[in-house]
Amino acid sequence: MAEKISHIKRVEVPEESLHEQNLSEVAKAVSDNKDAILKGIGLLDTLNQSGTLDMIDALVKHREQALGNVMREINQPQYATILENLPRLLFLLGELDLEEIEQFTTRLQHGVKEAAAAEDADKTSYMDLIKALKNPEINRSITMLLEFLRGMGRE
């Protein structure tokens, strides 16, 4: 029968050797990630120059006090309706088709520019309105407005 193990001899790595191994690992990691490290240093420099780094440092050091101040301020009655409507607003933004809204706002902006550049007219008669319908741009705009009103009125 075998003897039981009563003494375990641990392999001891000299501290100098461990220190050299750690330094070589760090040097390899720095060499492999040189671009990312340089970008990080640039980002830190920019944050430092703008004073943002000091603000972030103070915020992290005093996070409990800062969070308490933020929560106390948010708890004000004037912010209650904002906080209640915030989730609904986020869901609404998720449902919007931003490409269509962008096209619509671009057209709206062109219309506002044209209206601002137009000369002041005395009056528009019924005949002027009928003549204006022959203009393809005006006809297209009126058709778009009618479709908008039709869509808004649907249930």
Image: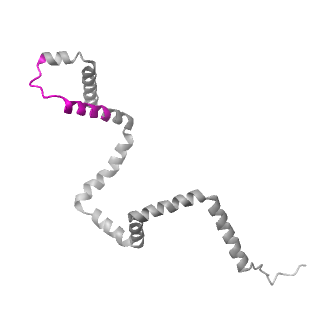
Q: Give left or right: position of 121 versus 113.
A: left
Task: Say whether residue 121 is magenta.
Answer: yes
24 relative to 43, above or below = below
Residue under the point 58% across and 56% down: 35
Image: magenta residue range: 105-126
Task: Say whether residue 144 is magenta.
Answer: no
Residue under the point 37% across and 45% down: 91
Q: Give left or right: position of 84 versus 11.
A: left
Residue under the point 77% across and 80% down: 10
Q: Nearer the viewer, residue 102 or 91?
A: 102
Tell me if I can see residue 97 in this picture.
no
148 relative to 9, above or below = above
Residue 100 place in picture, x, y as percent = 36, 33
The answer to which quarter of the image holds residue 50 is: bottom left
Residue extending farthest to the right is: 1
Residue under the point 64% across and 63% down: 29
33 relative to 3, above or below = above
Q: Nearer the viewer, residue 97 or 21?
A: 21
What is the chief secondary structure element of the magenta stretch? helix
Tell me if I can see residue 19 in this picture.
yes
Residue 45 place in picture, x, y as percent = 46, 63
Quarter in which the N terminus is drawn: bottom right
Q: Nearer the viewer, residue 144 or 85?
A: 144
The answer to which quarter of the image holds residue 107 is: top left
Quarter in which the C terminus is drawn: top left
Residue 102 place in picture, x, y as percent = 35, 36
